[in-house]
Every structure is written in structure tokens, then in C-alpha cells.
Amino acid sequence: MVFGVHRDIEVDTAVLCETCQGSCTQPGTSPVTCDICGGTGHVQRQARTLLGNVVTSQPCGSCEGFGTRIVHPCEACHGQGRVRSRRTVSLDIPAGVESGLRLQLPGSGEVGRGGGPHGDLYVEVTVAPHPTFSREGDDLLATLEVSMTDAILGTQTTIDGLDGSVDLEIRAGVQSGDVLTIKGRGITPLRGSQRGDLRVGVQVVTPTRIDGKQRALIEEFAKKTKAPGPQLAQFQQGLFSKFRDRFRGN
Ligand SMILES: [Zn+2]
Ligand SMILES: [Zn+2]
């Protein structure tokens, strides 16, 4: 979806019958003129109504309007002029497609009955979810988990983007919910060439298991920083909570 892709898909469609080339008759035989309609393909019917006799023209039921009848139907296609066949269709899926988009391939559909022209093939695209990246407009979103110590001290890291690695600078004092934007590493839109951005939401991970020595160090750190206790603040409906909702599948 991000870069576009070439796919070969297999489809079951009706193709021209090779045996009769769409003529529907067994090779060596030919259709005969319909004796019901005399080859015109339609019959006239008289009906007696209050207004007098009315003549109507209807397609001939015997030859289905073709004017000819097939005495010896082609055995390969049972007189249909086409057979079902599995074939491979090459598809170029453009970058930036969204689920539900329909690609139209003119002339790649079924051949008509009696060797009629090909219809079109419509292919509906479904974008498979990615375990890490999700989409918002032309941007790619992901979460970056940062350890508590890296968040305090700052660090440099390399993440795997969809098209190669990206060097990231995590500043000292980064907070959960901070968003790092990497320009031009998002999605190429379907109409346009300007790629969106890769946006990475920081989530600081608090250690859940520490040993006695680590605990003593943290307690000493707490004593030195004299941080205020828990403080109530305004609820934030920020970008990052949207990130998290997204990954929970909301
Ligand atoms: Zn045939
Ligand atoms: Zn007829």
C-alpha cells in the first residue's frame, strides 16, 4: 500500500472456446436457419382485443432471436461458445490505495456467450493490517517504547521504517505522548507525489521489577530530586491517546 505493488492474481472466467472459436457448433457442422421464424429471429403474434386484432412482434423462442438453430452443439463448450478457465491477470496496484478501492481492467472480464466481446474485470483492494504501522491520511503512525532511564538521559536509536532505517534522537526528558515526526517517510498518496510523514509516538516504559540495589538507587535519586507527589491535571485528549486507541483496535 505504501509503495505500490505488482501482483499476479488468478481468476476463474469464461474464455473463448478454442474448439468452436465461439461459433457454438461442433466443428464440421453449421447452424441451420430456424424454421419457426424463417431466420428473422422474431415471430409475430396476433391477439384479439377490444380494439380489434393487434399484431405484436416477439423474439423467436425456438432460436432465442438468433435466426439460426444449432443442430450439433460444440461438445467442448456445450454450445455456449465459451468455457470456464483459470487464468493469471497481472495487476499494478498504485501506492496509496485504501481498502474498498476498485481497480478496473478493461477487457479482462468474461467473454460473452456465443463468443461475444470481453467484459471488464473489477478488482477490489483490501489493505492488510501491519503489525507495527497504521495509517492516518498520508502519514504512517507507530509507537516507540522508551525505557525510563533513556527518557531521563536521552539517547540515540535507529528504527526500522518501511523503507529502510531511520536515525532518531531521543532528547533528554522526553515525555510519554511526545511525537517525533520524520518528514517524507509516510505514504505516497494515490493522487500526488508528496509523501506523508512517519510519526512516532513516545511511550515511556516504567520498570516493573527492580532488585534491592536498584531500589536503593532510585530511592536516593528520589530524595535528591525532591519531586512533587502525584498532581491532578487537566485530561489530555492528545495525539498519543489516539495512537494507543488505534493499537487497541478502537
Ligand atoms: Zn465450443
Ligand atoms: Zn427462430
Image (cartoon, rainbow, N blue to C red):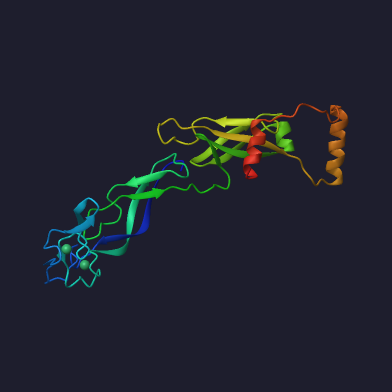
Residue 159 on image: x %, y %: 57, 40
Q: Position of residue 178 (x, y in %)?
A: 66, 30
Relative image position of residue 60 (x, y in whole percent)? 20, 61
Q: Quadrant of ligand 1?
A: bottom left
Q: Residue at x 87, y 34 (%)?
A: 220
Q: Where in the figure is residue 59, as x and y percent of width and height?
A: 21, 58
Q: Quadrant of the C terminus?
A: top right
| 60 to 205, vertically: above or below | below
37 is higher (above) or lower (below) than 243: below
Q: Residue 233 vs residue 136: left or right?
A: right
The structure residue drawn at horizontal position 65% and vertical position 34%, both measured from the top left corner, is 240
* 149 and 14: which is toward the camera: 14
Residue drawn at the location 23% of the way across and 53% of the way down: 117
Q: Quadrant of residue 237?
A: top right
What residue is drawn where x is 87% and y is 36%? 219
Q: Is residue 49 above or below residue 103?
A: below
Residue 30 location, quadrant: bottom left
